[in-house]
Amino acid sequence: MLETPPLHHDAAALLRCMAHPVRFAILARLMEGPEVVGTLVEALGVEQSALSHHLRTLRDAGLVAGDREGRHVRYRLDDAHVATIVRDTLAHAAERHAGDTP
């Protein structure tokens, strides 16, 4: 049996982190620019506590970063590669979806 290189394990872990629908929506939203938690809560329709949990998971994975501005934290993508992955995934899903319609 072939052994999987450690880099493949790391890449798969990042994709698993991104694969949750709420986390993916957060990343897609942050592609448009930095956002504060309140704006993300409104835009995504999730509770603040759930959003904070997902942001912490994305932060721990190194996918987003937060910059404190007074009482608020403005979140942004922490790596340009993330935007490329999200953009390409959305484009691929749109192509597949378009192929399903008569």
Image (cartoon, rainbow, N blue to C red):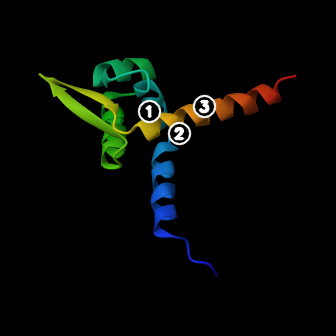
Q: Which residue is drawn at the image coordinates 45% and 48% (left, top)?
A: 17
Image position, residue 57 (x, y; %) = 35, 45
Q: Nearer the viewer, mark 2 or mark 3?
A: 2
Q: Quadrant of residue 102?
A: top right
Q: Which residue is mark 1?
A: 27
Q: Which residue is mark 3?
A: 90
Q: Residues within 10 Å of mark 1 (few under 14, many from 20)?
A: many
Q: Residues within 10 Å of mark 2 (few under 14, many from 20)?
A: some
Which numbered marker is on residue 73? none
Mark 1 or 3 closer to N-term?
A: 1
Q: Nearer the viewer, mark 1 or mark 2?
A: 2
Amino acid found under the numbered disc labelled 3: Leu
Q: Which residue is drawn at the image coordinates 82% and 24% (left, top)?
A: 101
Q: Residues within 10 Å of mark 3 (few under 14, many from 20)?
A: some
Amino acid found under the numbered disc labelled 2: Ile
Q: Quadrant of residue 78?
A: top left
Mark 2 or 3 closer to N-term?
A: 2
Label 1, label 3: how far apart the Cα atoms are: 11 Å
Tell me whether circle 1 and circle 2 mark residues in contact (CB < 8 Å).
Answer: no
Position of residue 74 in the picture relative to residue 64 (left or right): left
Amino acid found under the numbered disc labelled 1: Leu
Q: Which residue is drawn at the image coordinates 51% and 36% (left, top)?
A: 84
Local secondary structure at mark 2:
helix
